[in-house]
Image (cartoon, rainbow, N blue to C red):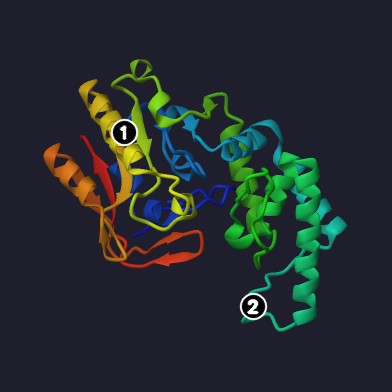
Amino acid sequence: METNCIISPIFYMGNKKKLIKKGLIELFPKNIDCFIDVFAGSSIVSMNTKANKYFINDVDINLKQLYVLFKKYDANTIINHIKSRIDEYGLAKERTKRNEFKDKNKIEQYKNAYMNFRSYYNTHKNVLDFYTLMFYSFSQQFRFNNKGDFNMPCGNDCFSEKNEEYVKNGCRFYHSDNVHLSNMDFRSIPIDMITDKDFVYLDPPYFNTTATYNESRGWTEKDERDLYKFLENLSGHDIKWGMSNVFENKGVVNQKLVDWCNENNLKVYTFDKFTYMACGKGNSNAKEVLITNY
């Protein structure tokens, strides 16, 4: 029996929706005071976890912008802005998946509309436009070049009624006074401010996958080692933590992670018949796990 899942309005690689439906949250401790989401990403895990307060953190400043967007604006303001941009630029109001959508002229028209809107955003850099742009980008993801310009190619999606519901989900969550936002490297998180009543959840970049954050060595072997030290430090302070990760992906085993789990006598939970997807790239045979110190 699958668990219900509140869907985040932010689309981000490694989204944990499927794992949540398979019982990820049930593996967390009960009666959490502060839920500390170190690599929050879409923050879908926080949105589905019961706690007294939430510490939403991600080192990616673009994600922080989106968190602030949902904390600052009400749902109607966000939805109305998106719809007005769709009308203004002639963006698609229907999915245009290439092998199903036969009108080639319309596809080209929508692509041009997207490129015009992307150019407008890169000139003006408004966060509401940034969020709108994501609905039409490839895999609804964001990526920026060295100049800071959004450069994701056009995708085949649109803004739907379901997306409106997700926006409302986000505003309900982020508007709460007990949700605090941060933009820190995990090494900078002050462990002395965390108590044994809190719970630290980590969904870091996976060292042995080909997600976009690893294409330019965005997560290095040093980062992986420092992460293990950070977790060992948490354990030394009797702080409960859980980490999502993968032991094996496309035949590549993260042996360092496997050995580290064994050396530290950590618990490892697996999720069978689950396929991890990273930004449109199929990573079949990924052995997704939840690692805990409790």
Image quadrant containing the N terminus:
bottom left
Q: Residue at x 50, y 35 (%)?
A: 59
Residue under label 2? 98
Please, which residue is most extreme toward the bottom here?
102
Give the x, y percent position of residue 290.
28, 47
Question: Does dot 2 land on a helix, a strand or a loop?
Answer: loop
What is the crowding at mark 2: few (fewer than 14 residues within 10 Å), some, or many (at least 20)?
Answer: few
Q: Is residue 7 above or below residue 273?
A: above
> Marks 1 and 2: in contact by CB < 8 Å?
no
Closer to the camera in the image, 103 or 198:
103
Residue at left 35%, top 68%?
A: 284
State left or right for residue 82 relative to residue 208. right
Residue to which mark 1 is pinned: 226
Q: Which amino acid type is marked by label 1?
A: Asp
Residue 89 placed where, x, y %?
84, 58
In whole angstroms, how far apart are the C-alphas of marks 2 and 1?
Answer: 43 Å
Judged left or right of residue 226, residue 53 is right
Helix, strand or loop at mark 1: helix
Give the number of the mark in front: 2 or 1. Answer: 1
Residue at far right of view: 88
Depth check, front residue: 111 or 95: 111
